[in-house]
Image (spheres, rainbow, N blue to C red):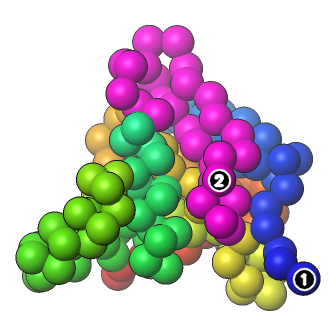
């Protein structure tokens, strides 16, 4: 049996991430939750978020999920092995966005159940909002990196 994130959990993540963003006075955010197969489960874009925020959030989450490491770790790897990340981006059809803000989602047992991508503020703030949303849903955030 495959374990994946539920629609209710995805909605809780979105609500928690947006609440965190508002509490921290971040720029308007776009929050995307993918299931463990990389399919969108929930997405919201706040008023004022620019038109490409879905694609950026997707590239962060999809890349993290596809490589099994949070996008912070992908960012670090891109600095150390730029040719590898460039090749992977080609294999992903240009969909990879290797900067913080793509966070893996794990259940209480540590099983990968999905990923969250956020875009709208700076990458560190995007990642913090993703972590807050995941934790608000009672799940474990795995951003990768140190």
> Can residue 58 be seen in the rendering of this structure?
yes
> Can residue 26 be seen in the rendering of this structure?
no
Per the rendering, the mark at residue 49 is none
* Pick the front one: 129 or 109: 109
Question: Which residue sits at x=55%, y=24%?
Answer: 45
Q: Secondary structure at mark 1?
A: loop
Q: Does residue 1 sit above or below 49 in this rendering?
A: below
Which residue is farthest bottom? 109
x and y percentages locating residue 58 in the rendered image: 47, 47
> Which residue, given by chain and number where applicable, does mark 2 sit on?
39
Q: Earlier in the sequence, mark 2 or mark 1?
A: 1
Relative to residue 136, is residue 128 drawn left or right?
left
> Which residue, given by chain and number where applicable, does mark 1 sit on?
1
Question: Which residue sits at x=41%, y=38%?
Answer: 55
Q: Secondary structure at mark 2?
A: loop
x and y percentages locating residue 76 in the rendered image: 22, 75
Please say whether residue 40 is one of the residues in the magenta stretch: yes
Question: Which residue sits at x=41%, y=64%?
Answer: 63
* Pick the front one: 63 or 99: 63
x and y percentages locating residue 99 in the rendered image: 29, 58
Please say whether residue 1 is one of the residues in the magenta stretch: no
């Amino acid at each position: 049996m495959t374990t994946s994130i539920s629609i209710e959990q995805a909605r809780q993540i979105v609500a928690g991430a947006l609440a965190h963003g508002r509490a921290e006075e971040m720029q308007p955010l776009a929050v995307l939750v993918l299931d463990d197969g990389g399919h969108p489960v929930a997405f919201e874009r706040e008023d004022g978020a620019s038109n490409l925020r879905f694609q950026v959030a997707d590239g962060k989450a999809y890349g993290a999920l596809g490589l099994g490491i949070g996008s912070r770790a992908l960012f670090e790897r891109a600095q150390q092995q730029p040719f590898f990340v460039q090749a992977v981006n080609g294999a992903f059809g240009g969909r990879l966005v290797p900067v913080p803000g793509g966070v893996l989602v794990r259940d209480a047992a540590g099983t990968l159940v999905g990923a969250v991508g956020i875009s709208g503020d700076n990458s560190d703030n995007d990642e913090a909002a993703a972590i807050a949303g995941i934790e608000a849903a009672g799940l474990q955030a795995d951003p990768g990196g140190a």
